[in-house]
Every structure is written in structure tokens, then in C-alpha cells.
Image (cartoon, grey):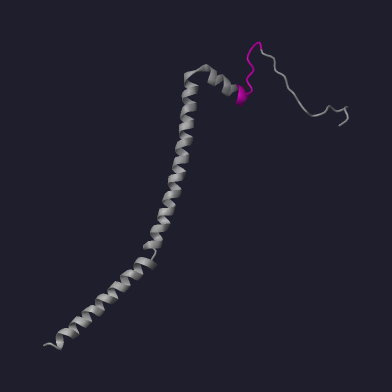
Amino acid sequence: MSRRRPLFLRITLIVLGVCLILLQARLWVSADGVAGMQRLADRLELQRTENRELADRNERLHAEVRDLKSGFSALEERARADLGLIAPNETFYVVSDAPEAGEPR
């Protein structure tokens, strides 16, 4: 009986050791192991950065919408900048640096 017990113990330890090695190999080498977790962490950080940028952009757009809804001056400023609005009783001047056809350069 004493000879049988150490043999059983050795076989059990060998089986457990092989299982431990296989589990460790899967942890370090497989796609869902440590390397996969690092890739996911990197992607998560990139997504958080993009989300912060988009949240800032959304806040600026919300502020612009509030300005356009609240006052005529913001609406007039936008129309002047984007559409070239000229109000009544205003004079519009075009200043150009290009020489005219007959002038020397």
C-alpha cells in the first residue's frame, strides 16, 4: 500500500502540473488572454477620447443653437458670415489686392 500511494500522488501532481501549464499558456498566448485584454484596453481608451471630443463638439453645437434661438443678433451674425447678408441702409464694399487689367504688376 505504501508503494501505491506515492505513485498515485506522483501521477496526480503530474496531471495537475500539466493542467497548470496548459491554463497558463492559454492565459498568455490566446486571443482572449493578456494580449487580448491589452488590445481591448487600448481600444477603450481610443473610444473614450473620441467620445470626449464628440461631447465637446455637441456642447458647442448646443450653445450655438441656444444663441440662435435666444437672440436676433446671433442670427444676424450667422447670416452675415454664411449668406453675405447686407442690411438695409448699409453700403457694401469689396476690397481686392488683385491689380486691374491695365495696371503693371
- Indicate the position of residue 49 as horizontal and vertical percent values: 46, 45
Q: Is residue 83 magenta?
A: yes
Residue shown at 40% from the left, 55% from the top: 40
Image quadrant holding the N terminus, namely bottom left
Left or right: 80 in relation to 56: right
Q: Which residues are magenta?
A: 80-89
Left or right: 43 in relation to 8: right
Is the residue 75 above or below the residue 34 in the image? above
Left or right: 77 in relation to 98: left
Is the residue 13 above or below the residue 77 in the image? below
Image quadrant holding the C terminus, namely top right
- Indicate the position of residue 104 as horizontal and vertical percent values: 88, 30
Residue shown at 29% from the left, 72% from the top: 20
Hey, which quadrant is residue 76 in on the image? Answer: top right
Is the residue 98 above or below the residue 86 in the image? below
Q: Is residue 40 magenta?
A: no
Hey, which quadrant is residue 37 in on the image? Answer: bottom left
- Indicate the position of residue 36 as horizontal and vertical percent values: 40, 60
- Indicate the position of residue 85 as horizontal and vertical percent values: 62, 20
